[in-house]
Image (tube, rainbow, N blue to C red):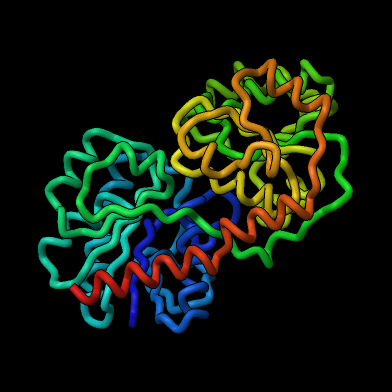
Amino acid sequence: MRVALIAAPFIAVPPADYGGTELFVAQLAEGLQKAGIQAVVYTNRESSVGVERRWIYEHSEWPIKSQERAWARELNHTSWAVRDALESCDVIHIQSLQGLVFSRFVERPFVLTLHGPHDATSSECFAHYPEVHYVAISQAQARQETMPKLRTIHHGIDLRLYPVVENKQQYLSFIGRIAPIKGTHIAIDVAQRTGIPLKIAGQVQPINREYFEKKIRPHIDGKLVEYIGPADLRGKNELLGNSMAMLFPIQWNEPFGLVMVEAMACGTPVLAMRGGSVPEVVQEGVSGHICRSVRSMAKRLHNLSFDSAAIRRYVEENFSLDKMVAQYVSLYKEAANK
């Protein structure tokens, strides 16, 4: 079997720092190859994923400066990729709405993984393509959709890339987009309430620049609150692995939250606000705590007691790359046989 994995052309696969979808595509592609499934990734030329790669755009373009230009580029990239994949692939796996419309014109099974939050306009569009196989990345996300061919497959990660750190240091970590819905300001509030230093890593996108300048920058002093910018895999491992806890104080219905799994893979507990996928990812008292408020999150930090090895085992049992790959292989075979 040969599978086309079509990613947007804006971020390399795997990403240098920001790019959860691109990390997913990279690890899935290499996992498929290991499982005996040929994978070809449609991306940009800067990508280094260890399978066959194809592209028409040379360079990454992130953050996006013009939505109109980005839409046109992704549409052009995706239409070319679908046409090219038709020549040799048995299944076409897309990651965004743009690719969906091309399923009408080709005789190949399509799989679409839903990476973003529920959106009524997108769901209305999905209803016109009932023959496509859809993958929700959490049960919370799946409950908001009604497509007939819908299943849930949790993300998994290559655990070899995430070493466990047993001896933690006395600081908190936050990794993610610097945005109101991610709760960066709440993480700072927790640090101020507890007096425990907080290290923040993440990208400030243009749309969130004002939020960063007004709500985040005034608190950055290099002592209690430190901002280190975007983090690559090495920096992420160092930040998460040495941290006594990662804060995930989201203010929306998180579709999955891959960084929670990455932190737990390093043996670091996650303290998260309840929302979307969080109860599916964090096991209360085993891999972290699910908190109701800033006050309860701060209170939990005063009596933190977790076994790093046990947290790692929890990830191995529930969010391994092998488990995710096996579920996608099963889906591809089912789709190709119908």
| Residue occupying image coordinates x 35% and y 49% | 114
Q: Nearer the viewer, residue 140 or 95?
A: 140
Does the image show residue 74? no
* Relative height, residue 194 to residue 100 (above, below): above
Q: Where in the figure is residue 54, as x and y percent of width and height?
A: 38, 73
Image location (x, y in percent) of residue 233: 67, 56
Q: Is residue 19 left or right of residue 56?
A: right
Total label count?
0
| In the foreground, 337 or 114 | 337
Position of 45 with respect to 149 (left or right) is: right
Quick one: 203 or 236, which is closer to the camera? 236
- Residue at 33% of width from left, 67% of height from top? 331
Name the residue rendered at 58%, 32% in the picture: 178
Residue 301 falls left or right of residue 66: right
Q: Quadrant of the N terminus?
A: bottom left
250 and 310: which one is in front?
Answer: 310
Image x and y of residue 71, in percent: 28, 47
Q: Residue at x 74, y 21 (%)?
A: 298
Quarter occupied by residue 122: top left
Q: Compared to 161, does 96 lie above or below?
A: above
Q: Is residue 145 found left or right of 35 in the rendered image?
A: left
Q: Quadrant of residue 333?
A: bottom left
Q: Position of residue 110 (x, y in %)?
A: 24, 64
